[in-house]
Image (cartoon, rainbow, N blue to C red):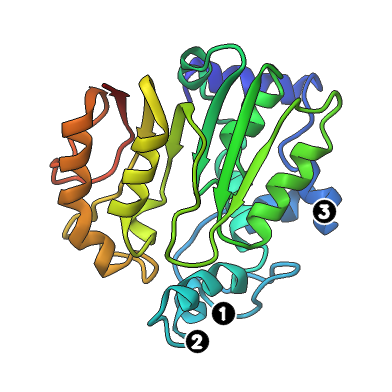
Amino acid sequence: MNAHSLVTAARQTLGLDPPWWADLARCYGVTPEEARRLGQRANGRRPDFPAGPKGRTYEEVWASRPRDTVADIIAFYGELGSWPVFRQVYRHRFRAWPEVARALPPGGFVLEYGCGVAPITWWLARRRRDFHPVLVDVPGQAFSFALRRLKALNPPLPALTTLTVTDERVPPLPPCDVAVCSEVLEHVPSPVAVMRAILAALKLGGVLWEDFYKHSNEAPPSPADLPSARRERPEVYDLLVRHCEWIAGRHWQDSEGGGTRRWRRR
C-alpha cells in the first residue's frame, strides 16, 4: 500500500472512519468475516452471496444463457447480484485517490464511467463536498449500492448526476474536469464509442484515468472481456493519442497489459 492507503487503513483501525465492511453489513446483514471471505477472489469459486448467484462460478453465470446481444451482456451484471458489490468494496477497502483529488477543482465535475460501487466518488465524498459526481453504469446491485450509500451521506453531496446504460448507446455526458474509466473498456461492446463520448465531455486541460486491460498470453481473458472490445483497442489509443497528452502510467502497447494511464485533454 502507498502512504495514502496506509492512512486510510489507519483511520479505519482507529475508528476515525467507518470500517470498510460497515455498509455491506448494513445492506446484506453479513459479519466482517463474511464480508472479507465473500470479497476475496479465487479461481473456481462458487460463493454463497446474499442476493446473488449461489453455487455457480463467474464463468458459469456467463455461460448460463447466450450473450449475443448488448441486452444479454448487460443482463449478466444483473445476474451477478451482489457479487460485484462484495468484490469491489473489498478490493478498494483501503484504496486512496489523492491524484484525482488534486486534479479536481472546487465545484468541478468528476465522471466515473462504469462506476460499479463508485469507489472514487465515495473516497472523495468523505473528504470534501465541493464537487459534482457523474456516475454511469448498467443496472445492477453495484450501481444501486453506490447510490444508496452516497445518498446517505450527512451532510449530503450538493449534487449528484446518475446515468444508466440500458443499450448500446452511450448516454449524453455533461462537461467534466476529471474522468475515470477503470476496468470498463474491455467489457463494453464498443469501447471506441465510449471513449469518444468521454473525450467529448472532458474539458480542455481535464484529466482522464483509464486502464483498458490487455491480457498477456499467459492470462486468458475472462468471458466478460469481449472480443469486439479487444478488436477496437488500437483505435481507442489512436483517439487518445490524437486528443490527449499521455502524462503517466504504463505504455498501452506494453506486452504485460495492465496498469492505469493518465491523460490530459488538449
Residue 89 in view of the camera: yes
Position of residue 173 in the picture relative to residue 127 (left or right): left
Residue 11 percent coordinates (x, y): 71, 19
Q: Kindly identify the amino acid type of the residue bearing the numbered disc 1.
A: Arg
Position of residue 201 in the picture relative to residue 212 (left or right): right
The structure residue drawn at horizontal position 13% and vertical position 46%, both measured from the top left corner, is 255
Depth check, front residue: 177 or 49: 177
Q: What residue sits right under mark 3 in the picture?
A: 27
Q: Kindly identify the amino acid type of the residue bearing the numbered disc 3.
A: Cys
For residue 198, the mark is none
Q: What residue sits right under mark 2 in the picture?
A: 64
Q: What residue sits right under mark 1 in the picture?
A: 56
Secondary structure, mark 2, is: loop
Q: Answer with mark 2 or mark 1, whichever residue precedes in sequence.
A: 1
Secondary structure, mark 1, is: loop
Confirm or deny contact between disc 2 and disc 1 (CB under 8 A).
yes
Secondary structure, mark 3, is: helix
Residue 218 in view of the camera: no
Depth check, front residue: 49 or 245: 245
Q: Residues within 10 Å of mark 2 (few under 14, many from 20)?
A: few
